[in-house]
Image (cartoon, rainbow, N blue to C red):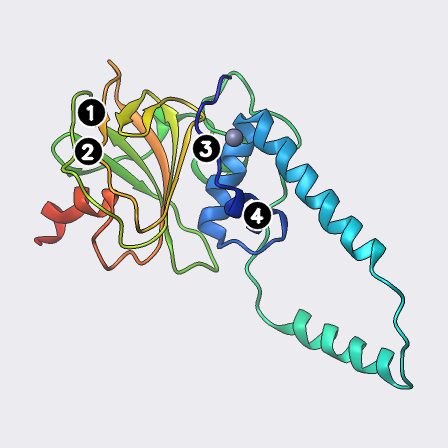
């Protein structure tokens, strides 16, 4: 699969260090299943992180320090922590256009997803995920659908699974990811003959400022 739009470096590092919200983690893991370049970049980031720990100079340890550290680790482990997804070992099964990490949540075929109409031309499938305040869902947008130019209320990650759309950043096809922060403004339009299906994670779902939230505005009446 030829991928043209990749993850932001900061997202790669946060994923490699296990410091990414589960909803965004799922989008990143799904992109990694489709992108050799980013999979390699995550491997490098994890290797560098391991080297840093390995090369840390020996410290003089005071009496009781080990016991205190053990207590801190135990206390930390007892806290509820967001689940960290395993990095996919290989590219997704070519027979399915659902990335492997996503298949346990939505099944093996985008055609069998339980779609709900949001507005004419736009369908959505919510994905329930524990341990996150962000939203994760699939969107299916009909050909020719064009969005008003807009900014973002928070971070938004969109991974194309089928079809394509274009905006000022270029054309986004299967495997391409838009990893956008709140400062970005763009005007995407679906330009494929078939509907464009994307996996989307958004922060702050109640603020209704992002690309996806604009789509939802007719539904929520604002
Ligand atoms: Zn990539």
Q: Does residue 147 appear to the left or right of 158 in the view shown?
A: left
In terms of sequence position, does the residue under pointer 4 or pointer 3 come before the other? 4
| Quadrant in which residue 92 is drawn | top right
Q: CA distance from mark 4 to mark 3?
A: 24 Å
- Judging depth in this view, the residue of 95 and 27 nearest the camera is 27
Return the x and y of residue 86 as percentages of the image width and height: 63, 43
Looking at this rendering, what residue extends furthest in the bottom direction? Answer: 63
Q: CA distance from mark 2 to mark 3?
A: 21 Å
Q: Does residue 44 appear to the left or right of 18 in the view shown?
A: right
Query: Which numbered marker is on residue 122?
Result: 2
**Mark 3 in CB contact with mark 1 (< 8 angstroms):** no
2 vs 4, front mark: 4
Q: At numbered mark 1, what does the secondary structure look like: helix, strand or loop?
A: loop
In terms of sequence position, does the residue under pointer 3 or pointer 1 come before the other? 3
Looking at this rendering, what residue extends furthest in the front direction? Answer: 57
Label 3, on which residue? 107
Return the x and y of residue 123 as percentages of the image width and height: 23, 35
Dot 3 surroundings within 10 Å: few (below 14), some, or many (20 or more)?
some
Q: Does residue 195 appear to the left or right of 203 in the view shown?
A: left
């Amino acid at each position: 699969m030829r991928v043209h739009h990749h993850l932001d470096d900061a997202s790669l590092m946060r994923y490699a260090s296990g410091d990414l919200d589960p909803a965004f983690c799922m989008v990143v893991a799904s992109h990694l299943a489709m992108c050799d370049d980013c999979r390699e970049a995550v491997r490098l980031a994890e290797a560098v992180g391991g080297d840093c720990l390995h090369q840390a100079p020996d410290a003089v340890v005071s009496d009781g320090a080990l016991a205190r550290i053990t207590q801190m680790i135990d206390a930390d482990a007892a806290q509820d922590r967001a689940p960290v997804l395993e990095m996919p070992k290989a590219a997704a099964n070519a027979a399915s256009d659902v990335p492997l990490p996503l298949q346990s949540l939505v099944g093996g075929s985008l055609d069998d997803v339980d779609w709900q109409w949001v507005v004419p031309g736009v369908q959505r499938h919510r994905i329930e995920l524990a341990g996150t305040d962000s939203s994760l869902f699939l969107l299916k947008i009909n050909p020719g659908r064009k969005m008003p130019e807009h900014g973002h209320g928070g971070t938004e990650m969109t991974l194309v699974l089928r079809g394509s759309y274009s905006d000022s950043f270029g054309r986004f096809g299967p495997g391409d990811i838009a990893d956008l922060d709140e400062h970005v403004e763009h005007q995407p339009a679906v330009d494929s003959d078939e509907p464009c299906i994307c996996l989307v994670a958004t922060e702050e779902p109640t603020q209704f400022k992002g690309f996806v939230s604009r789509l939802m505005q007719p539904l929520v009446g604002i």
